[in-house]
Amino acid sequence: MPGTLMHLALGTKVYQGIKSQLNIDKIQFLSGNILPDEAGDKTKSHYRIPCSVNSYMLPDMDAAKTELFDKNDPVKLGSYCHLYFDYHFFEDYAFNLFIFDKDNDKITVKKNGLSWQTKEFWSPRVFYSAYGELNHLILKDGLVDLEDVYKMPKILPLTGNERFDIRREKNWKDEVIDFIENELEYTGRIFEYETIVKLIDGLASKLTKEILD
């Protein structure tokens, strides 16, 4: 799934598109944008069902929309934004970026042929370090305002729904600060920054229209 700063980049862009027509709190909305990843059980908080590729699990967007698409609740709406990004990140982008070789338990990057065993690919050393490469570029280009990150609560808002309120032990803000302080060199071996920005821009435009219609 997209990294925290990627989620905040999409959330920021969507907020900019809806703020003139919706009276919505920015920090609450951005908090919702990372809330599903803070849950102790991501299967529940991400409404996961099998998707189109190798039975990977992605959000059931119909169920998520029914429960979360509330224009009067910035935390719920932000959580819907998070799941929207998760779903389209894979269905519209990542599934076209990789070759998923289920028979040989390998994942290969199409553009350069780099390949890993599946378990190793989905590890902090590979897939998630690729997110880390993007963080300083996201901040440098102003896709996320670091001041917004500092304003966001370390303990995210409670919703009254255990799907989101039973939290994991590791705190999101500690992780983000660690990423910022331990800046990784951008290699682009897995994700190309320009294509990620284009994806965020396109999804933000579509989701803004969905919210305002």
Image (tube, grey):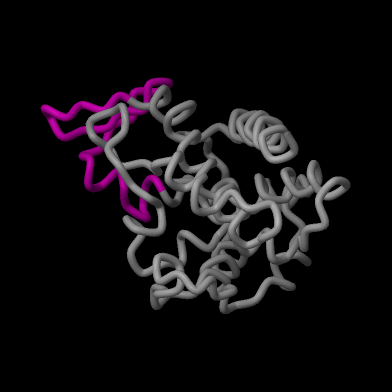
In-image side of 199 versus 145 (left or right)? left
Residue found at x 55% / y 59%: 34
**Horizontal and vertical percent position of residue 147:** 78, 66
| Up-down relation of residue 141 to residue 171 (above or below) | above
In-image side of 107 versus 129 (left or right)? left
Residue 118 forms part of the magenta stretch: yes
**Horizontal and vertical percent position of residue 11:** 67, 50
Residue found at x 36% / y 41%: 58
Toward which corner of the image does residue 26 lie, by quadrant? bottom right
| Up-down relation of residue 107 to residue 128 (above or below) | above
Q: Residue furthest right?
A: 20
Residue range (magenta) = 99-127
In-image side of 10 versus 62 (left or right)? right
Residue found at x 55% / y 49%: 80
Toward which corner of the image does residue 104 lie, by quadrant? top left
**Horizontal and vertical percent position of residue 127:** 39, 45
Residue found at x 75% / y 38%: 212
Q: Nearer the viewer, residue 103 or 213?
A: 213
Q: Nearer the viewer, residue 69 or 197?
A: 69
Q: Nearer the viewer, residue 16 or 134?
A: 16
In-image side of 89 versus 143 (left or right)? left
Could you tell me which quadrant the C terminus lies in?
top right
**Horizontal and vertical percent position of residue 74:** 68, 60
Total numbered labels placed on residues in the image: 0
Residue 44 forms part of the magenta stretch: no
